[in-house]
Image (cartoon, helix red, strand yellow):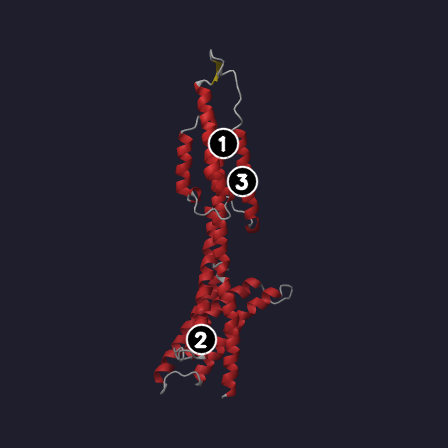
Amino acid sequence: MLVDKKSTPWIAAALILFVIATALYIPYAWNAPKGALGGSWQGLTYGIVGTALMAFAMLLALRKRLRTWQLGRVYTWTQGHVWLALLSYPLILFHAGLHWGQPGSLTWVMMWIFTVVVLSGIFGVIIQNIIPRMLLSDLQHETIYDEIDHVIHELAGEAAKIVVAATPTEEITEDETLSSGGTLIATAPMAMLITARRQLAEFYASQIKPYLASPRGKALLLTNAARSKAAFDEVRRSLPQSMREPLNNLESITNERRQLERQRHLHHWLHTWLLIHVPLSYALTVLAIVHILIALRYR
């Protein structure tokens, strides 16, 4: 969920409600003979409102499954999910008198889970606002996530074709001369070209090909952009001008592979937090229902 100008009313409303709830809680907690208690009418009010906001936040999952139903825009539900769920945390704390309960108790477990859910949600909002901008500004070769492996495979094939075209089998040409003993001897320019071709082929075989074939491109020389540039520059300085274009093309391919891996890494960060946030949210919902049933039974 992107935080933009459309989020301003939601943020303002959540802040205003938080200020009102805090302003009402302070005199209540200060003047209560036994301190703020969840069983008082004030405490119950905080608990009911906080639980209602939590329930609304959980309904977002149901709303996403019922996209064809006329239940309001998903964007509006998402804004409410974030800001009202965030507001529910201090309200539940006010309900409990700023206490988490006895260690090991159901209340204590719920508060720990609730805290992790809120923190993971905040983390999710932050990375959802940072990573898309990074993808747009830093990555020139972004592609569909599911196509990354296929694109990398195509890059490896393209690199192989470049090397084959740039390092053909050496043939005897008119630049070669025949010695008096009948042995073919290459001239100096031809010898330099043969050496350059061999050097390019060896660099491809030892560095570029393993990097492009690696499942994640880790722990290799070309994984790091600075070390990769230095390696290509070193080879480039030793090649004749006619051999530098193929090397430049190979460098572009490795740079594109590196950007695709960065996209994969950012994509994982963009979604991995949900593996914590979503299951714990459901667990919290179940525990909240159990907590309410227990409270009703002993009331």
For label 3, the crowd category at 10 Å Cα-Cα, with few meaning under 14, some 14 to 19 and many 20 or more, is many
Question: Can you identify the residue that label 1 sits on?
Answer: 246
**Residue pictured at 42% horizontal, 32% vertical:** 235
Kindly report the distance in space between the C-alpha atoms of the residues bearing marks 1 and 2.
62 Å
**Residue 75 shows in the view:** yes
Q: Quadrant of residue 91?
A: bottom left
Secondary structure of the residue carrying numbered label 1: helix
Q: Which mark is residue 109?
A: 2
Q: Is residue 5 above or below residue 15?
A: above
Residue 259 position in % (x across, y down)? 48, 45
Mark 1 surroundings: few (<14), some (14-19) or many (≥20) residues within 10 A? some
The reply, left or right, for residue 98 in relation to residue 172 is: left
For the residues carrying marks 3 and 1, which lies nearer the camera in this image?
3
Mark 3–mark 1 Cα distance, whole angstroms, equals 14 Å
Q: Nearer the viewer, residue 240 or 5?
A: 240
Q: Position of residue 58 (x, y in %)?
A: 54, 70
Q: Along the line of sight, which residue is nearer the eye, 170 or 76?
A: 170
Mark 3 sits on what residue?
A: 156
Q: Residue at x 59, y 68 (%)?
A: 62
Marks 3/2: CA–CA distance: 51 Å
Residue at 52% over, 68% down: 279
Residue 239: x and y, percent?
A: 43, 28
Amino acid carrying label 3: it is: Ala
Helix, strand or loop at mark 3? helix
Q: Secondary structure at mark 2?
A: helix
Labels 1 and 2: the sequence-earlier one: 2
